[in-house]
Structures are given as structure tokens and as C-alpha cells.
Amino acid sequence: MGRIYRIDMTDLQVRTEEAAGSYAGLGGRALTSAIVAEEVPATCHALGAENKLVIAPGLLTGTGAPCSGRLSVGAKSPLTGTIKESNAGGTAAVNLAKLGIAALVVEGQPERGKLYRIIVSKDGARVEPADSLAGLGNYAAVEGLFEEFGDKVSCLTIGPVGEMVAAAANIAVTDLEGRPTRHCGRGGLGAVMGSKGVKAIVVDPAGGSRVQPADDAAFKQAAKTFAAALKEHPVTGTSLPAYGTNVLASIVNEAGAYPTRNFSEGQFEGIEAISGERQREVILERGGKVTHACSPGCVINCSRTYVDKDGQYVTKGPEYETIWAHGADCGIDDLDAIAQMDRIEDDLGIDTIETGATIAVAMEAGVIEFGDVQGALNLLDEVRRGTPMGRLLAAGAVVFGKAYGVVRVPTVKGQAMPAYDPRAVMGIGVTYATSTMGADHTAGYAIAANILGVGGSVDPLKPEGQVELSRSLQTATAAIDASGLCLFVAFAVLDEPKAMEAICGMLGSLQGRPFTAEDFAAIGRKVLLRERAFNRAAGFTDADDRLPRFFKTEKLAPHQITFAVSDEELDQVFNFEE
Amino acid sequence: MGRIYRIDMTDLQVRTEEAAGSYAGLGGRALTSAIVAEEVPATCHALGAENKLVIAPGLLTGTGAPCSGRLSVGAKSPLTGTIKESNAGGTAAVNLAKLGIAALVVEGQPERGKLYRIIVSKDGARVEPADSLAGLGNYAAVEGLFEEFGDKVSCLTIGPVGEMVAAAANIAVTDLEGRPTRHCGRGGLGAVMGSKGVKAIVVDPAGGSRVQPADDAAFKQAAKTFAAALKEHPVTGTSLPAYGTNVLASIVNEAGAYPTRNFSEGQFEGIEAISGERQREVILERGGKVTHACSPGCVINCSRTYVDKDGQYVTKGPEYETIWAHGADCGIDDLDAIAQMDRIEDDLGIDTIETGATIAVAMEAGVIEFGDVQGALNLLDEVRRGTPMGRLLAAGAVVFGKAYGVVRVPTVKGQAMPAYDPRAVMGIGVTYATSTMGADHTAGYAIAANILGVGGSVDPLKPEGQVELSRSLQTATAAIDASGLCLFVAFAVLDEPKAMEAICGMLGSLQGRPFTAEDFAAIGRKVLLRERAFNRAAGFTDADDRLPRFFKTEKLAPHQITFAVSDEELDQVFNFEE
């Protein structure tokens, strides 16, 4: 079952309940979205007392299942106005699960200007003043917390951007080395945490224990099969460990879908300098690490450790999305500069996709020139200082674009698009347009079949088949996000029937009941429909399931192509029932 | 019929056509909304080449009908995303009508950074470079234009805010004294003009002549009756001439509906210092003018001329809305400071309602304190300098609120609410919520029956009857805005059957056909349904026809009341057909 701790930030009291009724047996995104949909008024202000921040490990988290250490955080998003689940690695999910916790629900709102921390342990949860943490970057904040609580704890923190309740603020989750490098990045959930006056959540796993499956032997067998399937698949077993997520840069650029200078071209002339291949070389030359697990039990190890010329740690990764957002999208081909920006943004607690995209919009507005590294760093310094320019940047691409009258702002439902141009990868365009979360590549990663030939093959340059592809991926993703599995397991699952069987085997033996692929898909459908119902109640309609007009009117080089999936087709993505 | 000049800012060419087909016989808002609805893609970006700026005098404008000198300017609004008609006095409408012009349609978009002016005369329209006007305030801009073109011309200009295509930018129209004091204030149409590179439109009436009614004798008789009705009504004949629009301040404050400190209270303790009564005293003491016509042929004269302690001209009015927005809403009780801000904003070319409301949101955010006059003036200086803070302010209350994480932002469809709290005047709340224009008091001025006892009496503190009231006023207003009549004639029309008969008499004898009150209402219904259809196509739904949640959850003093008209009732406002 698992416990839910309700932490009321109005009276600073904690109430404990079992995850019962409609919440029973749910994990991860299924649980966060259920609680938000059921308890948060859809039309409330995301930064007001009525919103709730829900933190939940996945169903398989803490069981020892491979790649099952993901954390789901949900709320109404201040960036998009939709329901939001933002997903991160790190150690917190496993530690929460080991304490028998299904979810933390942070509710209410304290007096303005007060800061608190929440301590979660085997003895329960408590709220303590934390005014002394005010203004700290994530790195300094967690350093102090580890000193105080020991290096076994997990920390969820917000940086200065979360404290200023800015809509691009994220929530940092500490990794296996105790660094705040994993993030619930998208949708501004750090601002929701900040609006509740919570600077840090410390999870102390002492006294906790592994989640015990109903049929442990069967579970271990399924887990072993699953690990093997992940190891055997070329993406999860070879490409990702070798080159990390940034293995995609050359591939997507080659496909003409690598958004360059604020989505004005599909190929970047500086690709070589920021590719995954080059990144691997640089890291190896300097003595960094080219494989790195972002959470316990990972068998893919797609993260890495980036070091400077002296071999000193700079940041993790950086990941594909971050490198693109500050690289091609800003016309910057300097890997060290990108790593520096990644480190600064992790410390400030701001989403790297939204921030890179917003800097690109600032470049389009003429605030700085495309390619101007120092200008971009100066903008990040404005964020740190909380100046009006910094506030604008931290509010995301839509707000920045409005303040500067920019026509070409690549967002859906207020959230900046990630690193795939929807004109040249139409399947991901369908996901951007229709996802319950705004423009989000992880919501239905059509790149798999559009570009990588994983899970079949659908021509990225034609509208045919994209709706079906996106629908099926969005459904599977919602179920994966409920399970606590890393989304990257989908590569194996899409190609290898035995990987799907292994997931069903783990979920079935965990719960002591038969579990089929259809049960898995049903979880996904239910999550999506619940999220979509919330959004509808918040005022979203089919008209919001659209890309900005310029993707339909402005041709993208080199394919000279516009987004061609019709509105009528987009409106078919959710034509299913539970 | 009237001519339409299409001014293409892409190729800088002008095409002339007759207002034929579905545009024939339309004036003012009926024509601007028809052209925008028919020709502008609803989902286009308001600052892009696809939007059109349509400028049209009313049907009765130029005929000599009393109070018929209003100008309608329409476009898709960059502030609200809806269709927009913004309405102003001044001399331009009459001069356009005398030249036989039904509308100017400014289309396309020139190269970025180029500035032009459009010269309209009996010989047609032409586009000329105007880079030398860049950065000029409205006062300096029109001074130069009058020097060049003589003092008989009318000027429509944008200030620096329009040049920066900021969403609160307005369009200034010169008054009878040649000052840029009348404004198409709401909805950011100055940004649309700026996005088309048009700094100024000069209308030279030389060679033009009065619009000739089909039955001139009957027309003159109806016009005489109409003027008499306006003179006889206590509001248009006595209160407005004596105290100007700010006569309302004491009345609305007494009713507990005068929004104070960002809509946190309904009465302002500093009311006496900024009331219409006090304003009249100050102006009389200093030798300013307490009556003043904003456009030719006005018989109400509700404007005034505000002078400083040395008797030197400062600004017109200021009007009720401006005084409230910078006064009670900002906790400021200094009439001279408010007049100074009005002058600055007229010069910058920025809507005084949106700007005052945004300053109040900045105060709520803690950027400056409520009541801080110098702080407010400093913010306006940021606008003039185009700093990031200035950009934020000029982008309006919603964008400012997002950048600073403010929960209480009193807007509908992106536009700040005017000077009536919808909790204590529920009829105006219905208009705010459902108007095709966003929160707009002029779209259906329920204050008449809710507070002033004009056109019947509907209890402002109860939901009953408000939907019917707002519907009927919105319909009548749309017809008035099509006619070119000043909205204030409605006070007489609502109470005096002969005033309505006189309008029908004028419209009928103008066109040489029978014209009934039902014909008048039909114009209004058609305009509203056309506008609403555009908004629907742009993605607006019933869910957008709502007040921000805090008006339903937060009680307003002194009545301790929340907005009580239900969503279901709001959805009944437009339950009519053409």
C-alpha cells in the first residue's frame, strides 16, 4: 500500500494516511496525476495555496528492478497551466520507496517570505524553518544538508529561481555522488515548491528496506531477464553507454531535424564540436567519466561526468537536450561554455531546455546575437541576481517573447519545444501538440520510429502514421512513468517482446497477481485520460493541441518542409477510452 | 459607400477599392470587425505580417450628428489574442469621413527596424519613410507633423512603446487643439501599428466635405432632437460636463466597488483628494478648463484641461479610469502625480488602464510599495528607456504577474480590469468575463443600471438579472460603436425613447431607408457574433469567459462579497442569433 504524508505548509503540520481508495496500488505519475486531478481545483492559480506538490516513487521503485529509480513530481504547472508530471533520476525515489512512502503531498502555503525544509525519515515527516538556506544555489544547499544529515540522505532542493517562484524553476534531486544534478526539469515545479516556502526536502533512508515483492523468486527472475534485454539492445546496451544521450546530436542533425538558431534551420554547421562523439573524446582526454548512473540500479549508465581542462568536475553530462538548447538553438558550438551554463543552471535551479530556448528567443529579439557565449552567460547572471531581465528569462520563452514582441516562439501550451524540429520529425510534432504536458519529447518519443528505427519505422517527413505512433507511445510512456522505470527502457521494450514480458513479470510478481501487457497499456490510458480531463476542466481545448502557426507556414531547411499533420488528425490522438 | 485604402507595408504600395460586398454600408466597429474576421487568420501572431490594422470612422461620422466623431481601430490584439476594436475621439474620424474614406487597412510588414508614415489626403494615400521620427514621444512627433502639414490635419501616432511592439501600446489621436490626448487605448493596437513599421498616419482633410445624408432635412431634424435629448439628460447634460468622467470616483467608491490596492478592497481612504469634485476645484483654482470636447461636434464636453500650479498645461482630464488606475489601485492620492503619469503615458503611447493596473501588480509583487509615487514614476522611466523592467511593464499585467509570480492578477483574456470591482458590481463582472475584447467596461457598461440608476435598476450585489443586463448593453454598445457615436450617448438612449428614435432617424435619413430600433440592435448582434466567431476560431472557449478565481474565493470589503454569477449563467450571454 504505502503511506502518504500530507505536509500542510499553512499550519506546518503533517498528517499520515494510507494510499487507499482510488490511490491504492498507484505509483509514480499515476499517483501524482491522480492526486492532482482529484484534489487541486483545475482553475486555481498554480502558485496559490490551492495547488499541491505531489512527490511519488514509481511502482517498481525500491524493488531492485533495473532502471526503476525514477521519481515523479506532480502539480498544476505555473508554466503551462496544465497538470504536470516531471520525472527525475537521483536517489530520492528509491529512498522514499524503502521507507514505505507512496507519496509526499505538500499542501497549503505559509506566510510570504518564510522558508522551510521538510525532513522525511522512518519516524515520519516534519517541517523545520530553513530561512538560513535562503538564496543558496543547489550545490551549496545540498552540501550543507549532507554535512548535517550525513551522506546517505537524498535531497530535493530548489535554487534561487525556485525561491523567486519563476515558471522555469526546477527541482534538483541529488545523485549517487550527492550532487544536485538530476532534475524534475519541466513545467516549473520548482516554483510550486518555492510558492509553498519549501527550500529542501531531505529523505533519510536509515531503517528503510527493500520493497518486498509478493513472489520474490519470480520477481528476481523477471528482473534478470529485463536487465539482459536492456544490455542486449543496441541503443540501451551500446549507444547510450558509449556516447550518452548526446549520441543523438549527429543523428538528428543528419536527419535535418536539429533545431538551429531558434528553429530557423534544421542543421547546425557547428555540429561536430558539440556532438556526442566529440563530447566522449573531450571527457576521455581530460579524465572525466563517460559512463555514469543517474540513479541506483541503472544498467544503462547514459550519464557522464564532464570535467574542465584541469580535470576538475564541472557538471554531469551535459545531456543531449541541454547541449542542443544552449548549442545549436543559440548558434553556440563551444562544449565547455555549454557545460558551464549547465552547471550554472543546475545551481540556480532552472530548466535547461526552457532556459536555452528562452536565450534563443532573446537572440531572435536582438537582445544578444546568436552565438554570443558571453552574452548568454551574462543573461544567466541576471537570473542569479533576480534582475528584471533575469525574471523575464526565468519566466520562460512565452513570457520573454511577449515582453519583446517576438513572433517566432517555439512553444506548445506555454512550454518550450525540445531538440527535434516537428517539421522534420512529424511524429514528435504530434506529441508536442497533444501531450497533456505541453511540448515534451519524453511524453511520446516518436524519434524512436521516426529516426532511430526502433519500434518499427515511420517516415518522419510525412504525416501518415504519426498520430497512431504518438498515441501508442504516449500511452506506453504514461505507464512507464507510473512504474518508476526510466523511459529509456522503452527502446528495448519496443523491439523485444521479452522486455515487455519481463516488465509484466515484475509488476505481476510484485503485486501477486497476473499482469499482462494489456494491463500495462490500461494504466497508461487511464493516466492520460485523467490528465486530459484535468486540462479540460482548466479550460484547455483542441485549439490548444496545436503547434505555433509558423511551423505550418515557414519551411524548414534542408528538407524545405512544413508540419503537415492536420488539425483533424491531431484531434484523433485521444480517441480512446479507459 | 466610401473607399477603402489598403496600405501594404510589405511592398509599400496602396490599393484603393470601394467598400462593397459584405463590407458595404458598414462603419466603425462593424467594419473593422468584419474586415479582421474575414481577412485575418484567427490563429496568426498578432505582431506578424498576417495581422491587419483597420481604421474606420463610424457610420454617422462626418455628418454633423452630435457626438459622432469616434474612430474605430481594429486588429487581432497582441494583448488578448482576441479580435479587438479600440475606440477614440479626436479629429481623425471626422476628417477620414469627410474624405469619403470608409477604412484604412494597413497590411503586411516591412523589413524589421524600418519606420514609415502614411499620408492620407483627397489625392489618396501614400507611404513615406519616417526613420527620423524613431523614438519620439507622441507630443514631439505630432508637433513636427503639424509644422510640416499644417494645423488642420489629424495625426494618429505611436510613441516609443508602440515602436517596441509592446502589448500595452496604444494609438494616439490628436484632439481639437492638436494634442495627442485621445487614444485607442486598449488591446495593444499601437503594437500592431508598430509591427507594421508605421509611426504616424496623417489625415489631411483639405478638399473633403461633410457627409451628405440622403434626406438632409430629416437628418438635421433628428440630429437636433438628439442633441436636445443629450442636453436634457442629467448625466450627459449636467454631471459629465460639470465633473467629467471622474464624477464617478466618489459614486463608485461610495458603492464599495472602487478597486483599491490591486483589487484588495472596495473603498479608498484617499478618495477625496482624487475625486471629480476635487479635480474640478483644482482645475478652476489654477485656471485650467473644466469642460472640453474630445472630438468635433461633441455636445457633452466631458473632457477637461489639467494645468500645473503655474497654470501651464499638463494633460487632458485625466479621465476617471486613469485617475483610478494610478490612484486608488496603486494607493496613490496625489492628483498632480497622477496627471503627470497620464501625460508621460500619453507621450510614451501606452494604455493608462493597463499601465496603472500593472504598476499595482508590481506593487503587489513588492517591486515598489503601494502609494510610492516616485517609484511609479521610476517605473515609467524604465518604460521610456526600454529596459527589461520597462518591457515587462509595457507588456501588461499578465506578463508582469507571470515574471514576478503574482497570484492576484485582475485580468480577463489577458487584459487588465478597469475601475469597477466585479464583486460589488456584478453586472460589469459579466461584461468583463464575456466581452469579446477581454476585461472592458466600455463593452457593456452595466454601471448604468447597477450604480447610476440609468436604464432601470439592477442590484449590483446580486447575480440576478446581470446576464440580461450585460447582454443588452453589449449589443447596444456594438451598434453604437458601429455608428461612430460616443458611448456616453447611451445614458440618454437608455432613459429617453426619443434619443433612440433620433438615432434611428439619423441613420435612416442618412441612408435613405426606414431604420428601426430593431435594425440598430441587429447591427449590434451581428457585430458581437462575428467577433465571437473569430475568437472561437482563435481557440477561445467558454472557459475563457471567466473572472480570475480570486474574485470567487476572496471577499471584498466593505460588502464582504464574492462574484456570484455562475459559470452556467455567464455561458448564456451570447445565446442569441443574428
Image: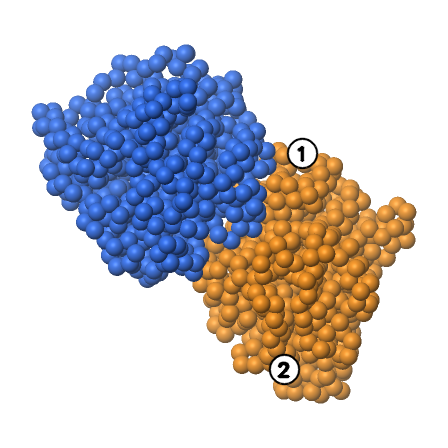
Chain colours: A orange, B blue
Q: CA distance from mark 2 to mark 1?
A: 54 Å
For the point 15% across and 34% down, the residue is: B232
Q: Is residue A460 visible?
A: no
- In front: A308, or B497? B497
Indicate which disc, 2 or 1, sits on the residue closer to the N terminus. Answer: 2
Report which residue position mark 1 lands on: A369
- Counting from the top left corner in percent of width and height, residue A517 is at 61, 77
Mark 1 surroundings: few (<14), some (14-19) or many (≥20) residues within 10 A: some
- In front: B48, or A222? B48
User: In the visual, does B388 lie left or right of B433?
Assistant: right
User: In the visual, does B85 lie left or right of A576?
Assistant: left
Answer above or below: position of B300 versus B41: above
Q: Amino acid at mark 1?
A: Glu
For the point 59% across and 33% down, the residue is: B387
Report which residue position mark 2 lands on: A1
Determine whether the residue tagged by mark 2 lies in a helix, strand or loop. loop
- Counting from the top left corner in percent of width and height, residue B383 is at 53, 32
Q: Amino acid at mark 2?
A: Met
Mark 2 surroundings: few (<14), some (14-19) or many (≥20) residues within 10 A: some
Answer above or below: position of B129 versus B541: above
Answer above or below: position of A109 versus B110: below
Identify the subunit bearing mark 2: A
Could you tell me if the residues under marks 2 and 1 are in contact, i.e. CB atoms within 8 Å?
Answer: no
- Counting from the top left corner in percent of width and height, residue B520 is at 18, 41
Identify the subunit bearing mark 1: A
- Counting from the top left corner in percent of width and height, residue B572 is at 29, 57
User: In the visual, does B404 lie left or right of A62?
Assistant: left
